[in-house]
Amino acid sequence: MSISLVAGLGNPGREYADTRHNAGFVVIDALAARLGLAWKRSLRCHAWIARWPQAAGPVRLLAKPTTFMNESGRALRALADYYQVPPAATAVVYDDLTIDLGRIKVSVRGSAGGHNGLASVHAHLGDGFARYRLGIGPKHPAAMDLKDFVLGKFTPDEQTIFNDHLTTYLDGLGLLIEQGPARAMNQLNRRTDQNDPDQSQLPRDLHPR
């Protein structure tokens, strides 16, 4: 089943805009900008939504919940019900502390790993949705409180790494959307020195419409 709903997770509000926990918002905003899409707020679905028309097939949706991270699943449940999108056609983009900064992993099963936003999505949607995991680890210093780390901002060096990989994040997300989780896992979960997927295998047709 192809992906028809892509949701980035994060916290609303300017104070959270540049935090590690908002990596999902950053990537979904960048995808909307690449596609030339405009965001509109849906009070019904507790989310900002960007409609992505296709030449053939149903309209795809990009979404950013306006709930706080811990209630992300409430927004995704409302979106799934209103637009009749099953979990198998949903992809969730979020930060993952267990993955090194600059790396990407895709999965469709597994625990929330302590990520409250993902736990909320799982509680409201069940299993079977695709997880597009953006590495923000490792936590440093090791003794730092987890909440303080994820709600903190990237250091200048970390921000450079994240920015340098943004195109790779978008191309990898395009692969997941266009070709599905199995192909994306095969390509993106391979460990390479640069953590860059084989660029020749990634779709290049995600252009502004």
Image: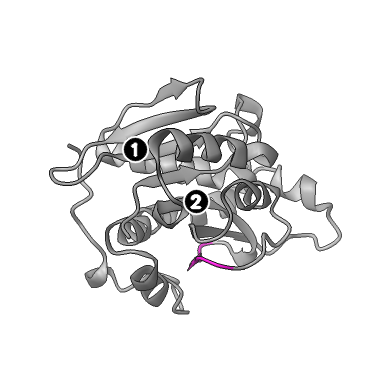
Which quadrant does the N terminus fall into?
A: bottom left
Residue type beneath disc 2: Val
Residue 182: x percent and y percent?
A: 38, 72
Tell me which label, 2 or 1, sits earlier in the chain. 1
Residue 199: x percent and y percent?
A: 27, 69
Residue type beneath disc 1: Ala
Q: Which residue is mark 2?
A: 92
Q: Nearer the viewer, mark 2 or mark 1?
A: 2
Left or right: residue 138 compared with residue 203: right
Q: How is the image coloured?
A: one colour
Residue lying at 38% horizontally and 77% vertically, measured from the top left: 186
Question: In the drawing, what numbered circle is on residue 32?
Answer: 1
Magenta segment: 102-109
Which quadrant does the C terminus fall into?
A: top left
For mark 2, does the 10 Å Cα neighbourhood hold few (<14), some (14 to 19), or many (20 or more) residues? many
Question: For the residue labelled by badge 2, is the local secondary structure a helix, a strand or a loop?
Answer: strand
Give the answer, above or below, for where 18 lies relative to 157: above
Give the answer, above or below, for where 208 lies relative to 147: above
Residue lying at 62% horizontally and 35% vertically, measured from the top left: 11
Q: How far is the residue under mark 2 from the one under mark 1? A: 15 Å
Residue lying at 51% horizontally and 59% vertically, measured from the top left: 131
